[in-house]
Image (tube, rainbow, N blue to C red):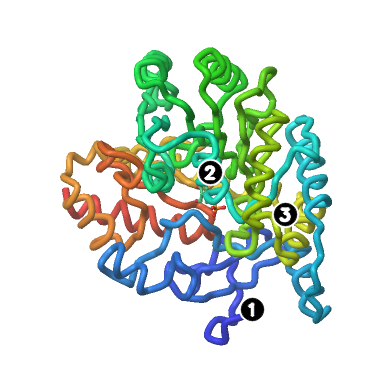
Amino acid sequence: MKNSQNTACCTPDTDATANTNVDCCSPNAENQNKISNNKYAKSNPNYLQSMFGATDLTPLWLADMDFKVAEPITAEIQRLANRSNYAYEFNSGEVFSAIANWNKRRNGLDLNPKSFVQVPGVLTGIALLIRELTKESDNILIQTPVYHQFFKVISSAKRNIIDTPLKIVDGRYEMDWEDLTNKLVSNDVKLMILCNPHNPVGRVWTKEEIQRLSDLANEHNVTIISDEIHSDVVFAPARFNSIASVTDNRHIAVLGSPAKTFGMQSISQGYLYIADQAMYEQIKATVGSMYLDHGNVISNYATLAAYNRSEDWLNNLIDYLQDTIKWIEKFLRTELPQVKMYTPEGTYQTWLDFSGLGLTKDQLNDVVVKKAKLALTPGDWFGAGHEHFMRMNLASPKKQVQDAFIKLSKAVNESL
Ligand SMILES: Cc1ncc(COP(=O)(O)O)c(C=O)c1O
């Protein structure tokens, strides 16, 4: 779908601009057509106005991608469009096998294709698991700063949020094991939501951390819901470790989707993976009773094209993002040392700490939004006490990210 106003090509390193109307390049050097559409939520002027009070901003806030999807996904959707027939077609079994094969290939993980349940999206899956596995007023644990929708999905189900904030140890976010254990016990927590890799801080939890968390949950009879939507964007030497890899997974449900990995936010669905047979049957029955697993043939075929035929595209994306991250590290070191980046081990989000500037929340907003003209996600969306942080989405043309940091540096220097 090409927008008539924007027919030019952009190369990531030369001509991408920060204009909100020219927001889409491919990370693949051979495939760099620009697509633009200001109806995308991220660059939609109405959203920008209501969130940031301005429309002339470089949109780096929402966690989606400016890049074209992999060619096999486009080809598959075109094939379906040409078919002109959308009769009932249930092919989720094929999708589950593709996801299992993908996990075996990329993560060495053995998943049983019969333990998946299809759901319309990851958040729908979390909302449903919360309602099925806990009751009103139960306590659910999260680790802030964390994906802001977790607050809503818990409170709208009338459950209570128990927060055990992550702590920074030697410049890196870690779980606070002592606080976590105390809060599990003293609040009689029934369920915890793990974010792995963790949005927004970019941690990819190690095998030891995952195993320790699972042991703790088993000891205290707590169910873990593991949101693994970002699991495919992981930067070496980090390696992804699914909670499904732990030895005793009685109390575990995994959620995933190709949405983030392949930039399919508006055309993909989600899945649950539940190894425990009793929990699987309970959830499967509820999902089935609401017909939530009906599936969508376009999403299913796009998902198959993604997992079966788009691995090179993903590897290329990861390399591209790693280059962008290296550039930012160097830029911050030399040009803007007052701003600290928590270098992501995974996800295409980066968590920036502006506390070195010594500004109030409003002053920081003036620098970032009014002067630098950037739309970044405010830190306090992810939990109280993070007013001096902002999250930036890096799945944009490198040149656009570079320009954003250059503008930021100029704005900071003018404000000092
Ligand atoms: C951690 C996390 N979970 C879930 C979602 C949303 O998933 P879905 O659109 O499938 O509900 C996002 C989107 O940014 C996310 O970052």
Residue visible at 50% across and 15% down in the picture: 220
Spatial distance from mark 3 to mark 2, Cα to Cα? 29 Å
Spatial distance from mark 3 to mark 1, Cα to Cα? 20 Å
Seen from the viewer's position, the closer of residues 98 and 240 is 98
Seen from the viewer's position, the closer of residues 5 and 72 is 72
Is label 2 within 8 A of ligand 1 (CB to nearest ligand atom)? yes
Q: Which mark is residue 253?
A: none
Q: Residue beneath label 1, please?
A: 1
Q: Residue beneath label 3, please?
A: 313
Disc with the residue nearer the chain's start (3 vs 2): 2
Q: Are marks 3 and 1 in contact (CB under 8 Å)?
A: no
Quadrant position of the N terminus in the picture = bottom right
Spatial distance from mark 1 to mark 2, Cα to Cα? 32 Å
Seen from the viewer's position, the closer of residues 349 and 11 is 349
From where the camera sits, is residue 398 visible?
yes
User: The residue tagged with tag 3: helix, strand or loop?
Assistant: helix
Amino acid type, callout 1:
Met
Disc tally is 3
Amino acid type, callout 2:
Ile
Q: Is residue 251 above or below residue 376?
A: above
Q: Residue beneath label 2, please?
A: 126
Residue 408, image x, y percentages: 32, 54
For mark 2, does the 10 Å Cα neighbourhood hold few (<14), some (14 to 19), or many (20 or more) residues? many
User: The residue tagged with tag 2: helix, strand or loop?
Assistant: helix
Residue 359, image x, y percentages: 17, 44
The quadrant holding residue 140 is: top left
Is label 1 within 8 A of ligand 1 (CB to nearest ligand atom)? no
Residue 63, image x, y percentages: 49, 54
Residue visible at 37% across and 74% down in the picture: 45
**Comparing labels 1 and 2, the label whose residue is closer to the camera:** 2
